[in-house]
Image: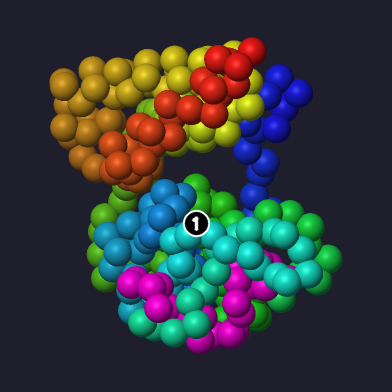
Amino acid sequence: MADTGAFKRPPSAFRNFVSKDPSSTYPAESGRYHLYISYACPWATRCLAYLKIKGLEKAISFSSVKPIWGRTKETDDHMGWLFPTSSTEEPGAEPDHLNGPKSARELYELASANYTGRYIIPILWDKKVKTIVNNESSEIVRMFNAEFNDIAENAALDVYPVHLQSQIDKVNEWVYDDINNGVYKCGFAEKQEPYEEAANRLYQALDKCEDILSKSRYLCGDSLTEADIRLFATLIRFDEFYHFYTANPVVYTVKIKM
């Protein structure tokens, strides 16, 4: 949190890259990588969307943690992503049969004994080296789009084509800041002023999307791109969750009491 009471998302910690170059540290090999997700997390599910649309299910395995946080250790009060104890405990979630941890936290501790950052999802895991390759969703989707084409069933699909990259990047910038992350800026704000600023920017950005999509099929023209997938992961949750989340009743309550 900033001193102003505004939510500030810290950067992801693991930023290595899988490459189609076979001599790289993390080459794009079939069966080598595993994607950990939560169906409750928009950042993780956009990675899963890429895995599916590129036809990488046979090359990259994936599994989901439980959708609701729980206590990750008995020795402290940290709350985070947990794995179920059986395949029937939570629909869609399953125990981690690769490493056997109780939580995503344990995966981070397995990857780095001195790790002190956030224990977030998604996680792109290297089964061979037994470590986290990357936990930044915007970079994972780029890898899935381009680096695994030799083993992807839908290699011809390119949602970040060269001729649209500049336009996609510009759209991604304001969609991320005001919508993808904007809903969290509203929900996590601890003071009224940063909440109102984030809420205003959020709904202005949604209006901007409405205007663009009233004139073209997709955000960047006539074809599906990365920008659409990144927006969709937030929009599909908006009415069910973010609409109430961004109403920020805690902030309004504080304001009334003051």
Display coloring? rainbow
Residue 171 vertical position relative to residue 15 in the rendered view, above or below: above
User: Is 248 left, or right, of 236 in this rendering?
Assistant: right
Residue drawn at x 30%, y 18% is 207
User: Is 199 left, or right, of 237 in this rendering?
Assistant: right
Image quadrant occupied by the C terminus: top right
The residue carrying pointer 1 sits among few (fewer than 14), some (14 to 19) or many (20 or more) residues within 10 Å by Cα, namely many
Residue drawn at x 33%, y 23% is 206
| Residue 154 x %, y % | 25, 64
Magenta-highlighted residues? 89-109
User: Is 149 left, or right, of 65 in this rendering?
Assistant: left
The residue labelled by disc 1 is 140
Count of numbered tags: 1
Question: To which quarter of the image does residue 251 belong?
Answer: top right
| Residue 244 x %, y % | 38, 33
SS type, badge 1 = helix
Reply yes or no: does residue 95 show up in magenta: yes
Is residue 56 at least partly visible in the picture?
Answer: yes
Residue 235 vertical position relative to residue 26 in the rendered view, above or below: above
The answer to which of 47 and 201 lies nearer the viewer is 201
Residue drawn at x 42%, y 26% is 247
| Residue 155 x %, y % | 29, 63
| Residue 183 x %, y % | 46, 32
Reply yes or no: does residue 6 show up in magenta: no
Image quadrant occupied by the N terminus: top right
Task: Please name the predominant secondary structure of the magenta segment in the image.
Answer: loop
Residue 38 vertical position relative to residue 56 in the rendered view, above or below: above
Is residue 17 at least partly visible in the picture?
Answer: no
